[in-house]
Image: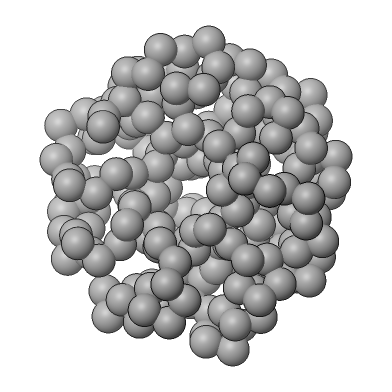
Amino acid sequence: MAIQTKICGLTTPAAVATALSGGASHIGFIFFAKSPRNISPKRAGELSASLGNQAIRTAVTVDADDDFFDEIVNNLQPALLQLHGSETPQRVQEIKQRYGLPVMKAFAISTPEDLEKTSIYEGIADQFLFDAKPPKGADLPGGNGVSFDWNLLRDFASNTPYMLSGGLDADNVAQAIELSGAHAIDVSSGVESAPGIKDIAKIETLLKIISKLPDEGKA
């Protein structure tokens, strides 16, 4: 499909199979104990064992240490590492060098100033992920089902490709892509029936909608 799509927070064979059959470009596994989508590295490896090159295995972490990264990489053999915590540019560089894998750094966005803060990661992170700032008191840095003003991205200039996240679902994804200019999106809670419970029909519907959209995103 023209618009790259990551279905994130997968925990069951049925959800993985549905994401793949629907044409998802990425599948994401979340390794964060506080998340209802948390999965063990061993289980993630089992779920993706027959994946081949059908989609990009993405390991989502939050300020993980080297020992945990070792366990994740050894079990999952990811093609992309997503850092969704407060990792510094130096830490991002260390992780890239340690594993020889591309890194996607996530940022919480609410204002133009939040976008400006990404500049120190230019040339270090291989990709950015723009998510909404979590609500006050939230335990999760992402997957909260909230969005930010997508218009903020329309005039955003960066040499680093980005993925749009935050509150996306079948009802608003077309508008989000049109307003932001994004050509890659990340969806987790928007295809669930309850926190951490992926809804097969919702995954199918969202991917069908995206498959019919023109690629209006940025290169």
In the orientation shown, which residue stands out farthest toward the front?
Answer: 52
Residue 91, placed above or below residue 144: below
Residue found at x 41% / y 77%: 95
Residue 209, placed above or below residue 61: above
Q: Out of 75 and 90, give the one closest to the viewer.
A: 75
Q: Quadrant of residue 117?
A: bottom left
Residue 102, placed above or below residue 42: above
Residue found at x 66% / y 80%: 71
Q: Position of residue 21 (x, y in %)?
A: 73, 28
Residue found at x 71% / y 72%: 75
Residue found at x 47% / y 76%: 99
Asked if residue 8 can be seen in this view, the reply is no
**Left or right side of 160 for 53:** right
In the orientation shown, which residue stands out farthest toward the bottom?
Answer: 67
Q: Position of residue 105 (x, y in %)?
A: 37, 60
Q: Position of residue 208 (x, y in %)?
A: 63, 16
Q: Quadrant of the C terminus?
A: top left
Residue 13, placed above or below residue 86: above
Asked if residue 59 can be seen in this view, the reply is yes
